[in-house]
Image (spheres, helix red, strand yellow):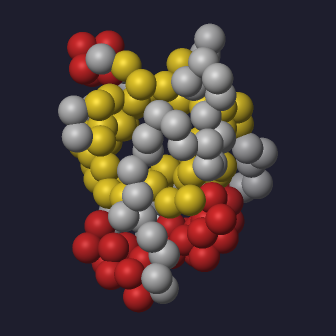
Amino acid sequence: MRTLPNTDKRPYVLFSSNDPAGLERDLRALHIPFTKLAGCYKGESEPSYLVDREHWPRARQLARVKDQDSALHIGPRLANGSRPAFLEFLNVAKKGTRAAQWLGWFRSTDKATALRQDAWTRRGAQYYIVTED
């Protein structure tokens, strides 16, 4: 499993699943490296999964099967420590075709700031959010 270190310039994809145990089993069966993180979306706690973008085409099929609406693409780390973030909509057959949506910047923050947001991700004691600026 990989972490999201401050010096890491690789792009990632972050997503969740309604069936965490099944998703983890499937990711392992396909030898897709992942990191399990804690997350919250609109007040609902949910496990989140981080994969290198290079593994996303295979993992995306699993996310689609597990009935997820979207995945957060996190770009390479920039000099200021932030990462570009956009949302990819999955399962468009249910909801119609939708273009990817630019969200802003994925960055680390303190717990108090994160908990005031609609969505956050946590790895260990470090919290992450997406901001517009």
Q: Nearer the viewer, residue 80 or 48?
A: 80
Q: Quadrant of residue 18?
A: bottom left
Q: Quadrant of residue 102?
A: top right
Quadrant location of the N terminus? bottom left
Residue 124 x, y percent position in the rendering? 23, 40
Q: Nearer the viewer, residue 61 or 108?
A: 108
Residue 91 x, y percent position in the rendering? 61, 63
Rendered position, 46 above or below 54? above
Q: Quadrant of residue 4?
A: top left
Q: How many marks?
A: 0
Tell me, yes or no, if residue 51 can be seen here: yes
Rendered position, 83 above or below 89? above
Rendered position, 11 above or below 41? below
Residue at the limit of the structure toward the front, as seen here:
7
Residue 69 x, y percent position in the rendering? 53, 54
Residue at image location 42% in from the left, 25% down from the top? 108
Taking the image as shown, residue 33 lies to the left or right of residue 46, namely right
Residue 10 x, y percent position in the rendering? 62, 49
Taking the image as shown, residue 115 lies to the left or right of residue 2, namely left
Q: Nearer the viewer, residue 64 or 25?
A: 25
Quadrant location of the C terminus? top right
Tell me, yes or no, if residue 105 can be seen here: no
Residue at the limit of the structure toward the bottom, as seen here:
29
Residue at image location 49% in from the left, 50% down from the top? 14
Residue at image location 57% in from the left, 25% down from the top? 82
Q: Nearer the viewer, residue 97 or 72?
A: 72
Taking the image as shown, residue 1 lies to the left or right of residue 80, namely left
